[in-house]
Amino acid sequence: MSMAKKTDLIVLELTSAIVMEGEIVTAGNLIEVTEKEARNLLARGKAVVADEQDVESAADADLTEMTVADLQKLAGDIGVEGFKSMKKDELIAAIEAASEASE
């Protein structure tokens, strides 16, 4: 993903699987992308703009029920450093800490 300010990102819901940063992201997942990336995915029918309720639901999701891949995606989205080498319990702790720090 290109370097963009957090406010420049758009939340999309995938309608089909895509590859992001070398990882497969399946349909139904929410992703944050730049406006240029969003236009590309929307034009190709790979995603739809996520509604606010979907974004809030994802934020409130029980982290323990998420897969490591989904936790890594979330950690990357919120700026957790070193998330790729973390185990599930470490990811959960780092995500919770980052969320509390941003409030």
Image (cartoon, rainbow, N blue to C red):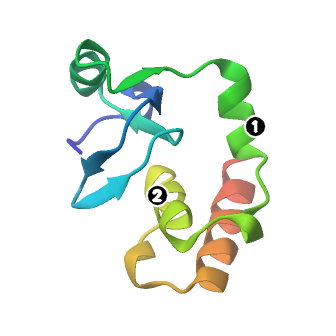
Cα–Cα gap, marks 2 and 1: 16 Å
Q: Which residue is mark 1?
A: 57
In the image, taking residue 65 as reference, residue 12 lies left or right, namely: left
Residue 48: percent from left, percent from top: 45, 19
From what the image shows, is residue 71 above or below residue 27? Answer: below
- Choose top left, top right, bottom left or bottom right for residue 83: bottom left
Point 54% across, 86% down: residue: 87
What is the number of callouts on the image?
A: 2
Point 63% across, 61% down: residue: 98
From what the image shows, is residue 54 above or below residue 94? Answer: above
Point 51% across, 52% down: residue: 78
Determine the secondary structure under disc 2: helix
Residue 7: percent from left, percent from top: 45, 27
Determine the secondary structure under disc 1: helix
Q: Nearer the viewer, residue 5 or 37?
A: 37
In the image, taking residue 35 as reference, residue 86 lies left or right, namely: right
What is the number of the mark on residue 42?
Answer: none
- Choose top left, top right, bottom left or bottom right for residue 90: bottom right
Amino acid found under the numbered disc labelled 1: Ser
Pointer 2 or 1: first along the chain: 1
Amino acid found under the numbered disc labelled 2: Lys
- Choose top left, top right, bottom left or bottom right for residue 32: top left
Q: Which residue is mark 2?
A: 73
From what the image shows, is residue 59 above or below residue 55? Answer: below
In the image, taking residue 65 as reference, residue 68 lies left or right, namely: left
Q: Nearer the viewer, residue 23 or 34?
A: 23
Image quadrant occupied by the N terminus = top left
